[in-house]
Amino acid sequence: MQQELILSGSPHIKSGLSTSRIMLDVIIALIPACVAAVYFFGVGCIMTIALCIGSAVGCEAAIQYFTRRAVTISDLSAVVTGLLLALNLPPNVPWYIPVCGSAFAIIIVKQCFGGLGHNFMNPALAARCFLLISWPVAMTTFVAPFAGVDAVASATPLGVLHEGGTTIPPLMDMFLGKIGGSIGETSALALLIGGIYLLARRIISLRIPLAYMGTVALITLLTGHPEMILFELFAGGLMLGAFFMATDYVSSPSSPRAQIIFGIGCGAITMIVRLWGGYPEGVSFSILFMNLLTPLLDKVLKPKPFGEVQKVNE
């Protein structure tokens, strides 16, 4: 009896996870942060989130349609980009800022480089920095929690420290989210819940978040302020960046050693900006800078192919 051999290209071992399933898990993991944002800053956050997501999805569908490519909005990647951007914005931004930010993230950072899988940096973070340069006042004006319609300007804990202030919020308020800041960065508890969900689902590994937060804690300890370790971890967008932005599949390294170096680099640059920079927060800049080094890290720290013969020195 003649037997037929079926030949196919690698990979031969496939995962049951699809792109849309991974993106859905990220959206589910961000729900606690969204709920905390609405609780602390009001229902206006829902409008900002909706504008970001709607603009991101609309821009992706439009540019793919007009460039005669397959429309891939069903993979939910544009939804994740819009949601992450929204969580990086202040609660009271004007409507045009989420729209412009989402358009920049999708059209410039993502689609101009080939779409999903080809962008060299995190689109949401790149858009946040673009908005910060374009509208610095609106992007750095925060409100106090539970302010309602009588929005009261409130500095972030890092902003207070950067200006030389000594009155910082209690750690419990920072852990729960009862502080001023961007929509999704204030509640460390909500972000930890989401991060644990992604780890349990094996969507991300612990290497980058642990290396990132461990480096921040170590530098804080070495600078002689061990009492500030939890403050540095809870403040700003560090939790959001460590679990949701630095772990982006496309713009972060793929090899384990490279991921650890990537996380260490993010932590080091974050603390350099916080301690000696002219801007109180360094999470966005640190991750974007390390995104640029991702190809180099993957090349230098590429794991050896399985079955490679060890070279013998003659």
Image (cartoon, rainbow, N blue to C red):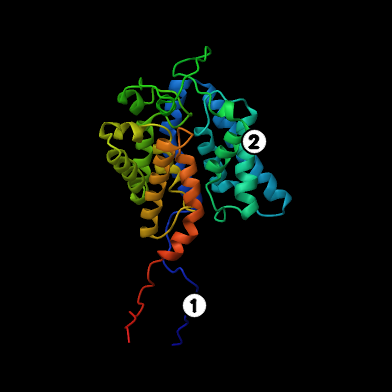
The quadrant of the rendering that contains the N terminus is bottom left
Q: On the image, numbered disc 2 is attached to which residue?
A: 100
Residue 35 image point, x, y percent: 44, 28
- Mark found first going from the N terminus, 1 or 2: 1
Residue 119 position in % (x across, y down)? 57, 53
Q: Which residue is mark 1?
A: 7
Answer with left or right where residue 88 lies relative to residue 306.
right
Residue farthest to the top? 150
Residue drawn at (49%, 20%) of the image: 143
Q: Is residue 258 left or right of residue 62?
A: left
Place of residue 27 in the rendered image (x, y in percent of width and height, measured from the top left): 47, 40
Residue at the image position 53 percent from the left and 50 percent from the top = 121
Q: Quadrant of residue 167?
A: top left
The numbered disc on residue 176 is: none
Which one is in front in this view, the residue at disc 1 or the one at disc 2?
Answer: 2
Mark 1 and 2 residues: CB-CB less than 8 Å, in contact?
Answer: no
| Image quadrant assignment for residue 224 | top left
Q: Secondary structure at mark 1?
A: loop
Position of the C terminus, as image quadrant, is bottom left
Amino acid type of the residue tagged 2 in the rendering? Cys
For this orientation, the residue located farthest to the right is: 66
Viewer-closest of 84 and 274: 274
Image position of 178 with respect to 109: above or below = above
Using the numbered discs, state the Cα–Cα distance from disc 1 to disc 2 in whole angstroms: 48 Å
Question: Which residue is located at x 40 percent, y 64 percent?
Answer: 301
Foreground of the two, 273 or 205: 273
